[in-house]
Amino acid sequence: MKSSLPPALLQLQPSVDTPYYRQIYTRLRNAIADGLLKPGHRIPSARALAAEMGLARGTIESAYGLLTAEGYIEARGQAGTVVAPGVRPHAWAAASTPEVNRPPLHEVESHADSAPAVPMPRPFQMGVPALDAFPRKIWARLAAREARATQRSDMFYPPPAGLMALRVEIARYLQLSRAISCAPEQVFVTAGYRDSLDLITRALLNPGDRIWVEDPGYPPSASLLRGAGMQLVGLPVDAHGMQVEQGLQRAPQARAALVTPAHQSPLCVTLSLQRRIALLEWAARHRAWVIEDDYDGEYRYDSRPLPSLKSLDRDDRVLYAGTFSKVLFPAIRLAYLVVPAQQVAHIDDATRRFSGGSPVLMQQAVAAFMAEGHFARHIQRMRRLYAQRRELAAAGLAEAMGRAVQMETTPGGMHLLMRLTGRRSDRLLAQRMRDAGMFSRALSECTLEKRSDLPSMLMLGFTNITSHEQARQLGQRILDLL
């Protein structure tokens, strides 16, 4: 087997903002997608490639880690690293979102310790970031500066699609962190994930449309879609994510699919590369939409965050939904939706008819927070902190509860999975925990219909668990409720 790479793959661009590890990852991924590197083809070791390119070994390992996590390559010990046998060439995987006319990012015009929030999050509350670790002083300084600079024009109705300065920063961030190439005009700022989903159903779907959803999945999504008149087609989830093949059998003519590919909610598994490909091929073939809910894709602990499903989307069928609530703080009530270039005018019209816009001052503060680099640094700090708190929470709960539970840590996300042993009801324990002032969600509460094939399991948020002792004491409280 070959062990060398084509010279073109090794020509990096030091003048662009994209980090070297991301450039290497993209070039190798594209070469595999184009069939230049075939299944079984041996690629150089990280040490050898680093020496050849004059880069740090860690840079190569970061790129290889992403490719391995997505299923493009696999390590075979002394036999070296090879292109995964099951990968098929797909030229569309290498394509990026079509460019649309837009001004350069740097030419967009800019606008010239608080008390703790109450009520504070309950123990194990999911989807709430570490509020104690948020840089409140920096945020207060930026918010005060933006407030002092308020002009009369800022006091008028906010732009329905969002402040352009913030849309620019979101587009730049997604390009670097989630491998999404989009223009600021494709980014729509909303008042939260539910607002993003509501906008999609109003603009692109009709009552009675069938939609693939994960089962188990995120209950609020199912509730909103049902309220909009959609017919939900629940697809089971296994270790590789949503079973796309089940959707092809049950409802091939569905109009859309809603997925959480980075960390499936609630099971935190990752949608495999093969299923991502199958999902996008189905959407392109049937002119269906794929709604990617990337609610906490920034937080992965065994490797760098995986690129988004949207980054593989050549046919412009994916709508990407992100949120600031789980990265900054829930009270911010800001999220964003990236739409295909050809749908910009249609979505813009829908925002003008159905959206009142979000407060300009809050958008200005977030834009400044991102532009000055605080946002990226905050995510990096939280990634390290959450990795620590995840281990503390899992260890403390396991120590207190012993054989009554099995703690399951996942590669990413903001919550733990706690499997109950014996014949204990997860729904009953979850209700007892809520009655006792804690938070919990039972796996059986996340299904579309009552099912007997799922394990008895609870989802527990760990981001605000600050010590092993706190987790141990909370574990003892849960044990008393069993």
Image (spheres, rainbow, N blue to C red):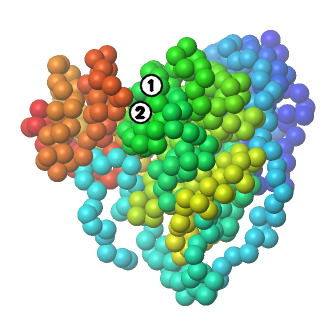
Is there a contact, CB below 8 Å, between mark 1 and mark 2?
A: yes
Lateral position of residue 13 relative to residue 259, left or right: right
Instruction: Please provide percent x and percent y for residue 446.
Output: 34, 33
Res 114 quadrant in image: bottom left
Label 2, residues with CA under 10 Å away: few <14, some 14-19, many ≥20: many
In this rendered view, identify the residue nearer to me: 286 or 128.
Answer: 286
**Mark 1, secondary structure of its residue:** strand
In this rendered view, identify the residue nearer to me: 66 or 171.
Answer: 171
**Mark 2, secondary structure of its residue:** loop
Quadrant housing the N terminus: top right
Q: Nearer the viewer, mark 1 or mark 2?
A: 1
Instruction: Please provide percent x and percent y for residue 265.
Output: 43, 36
> Height in image: 476 above or below 346?
above
**Residue for point 31% across, 37% down:** 459
In this rendered view, identify the residue nearer to me: 163 or 113.
Answer: 163
Instruction: Please provide percent x and percent y for residue 224.
Output: 43, 43
Q: Residue furthest front?
A: 207
Quadrant housing the C terminus: top left
Q: CA distance from mark 1 to mark 2?
A: 9 Å
Residue 38's tag is none
Lateral position of residue 232 relative to residue 205, left or right: left
Q: Amino acid at mark 2?
A: Gly
> Height in image: 233 above or below 309?
above
What residue sits right under mark 2 in the picture?
217
Lateral position of residue 354 relative to residue 427, left or right: right
What residue sits right under mark 1 in the picture?
234
Res 96 quadrant in image: top right
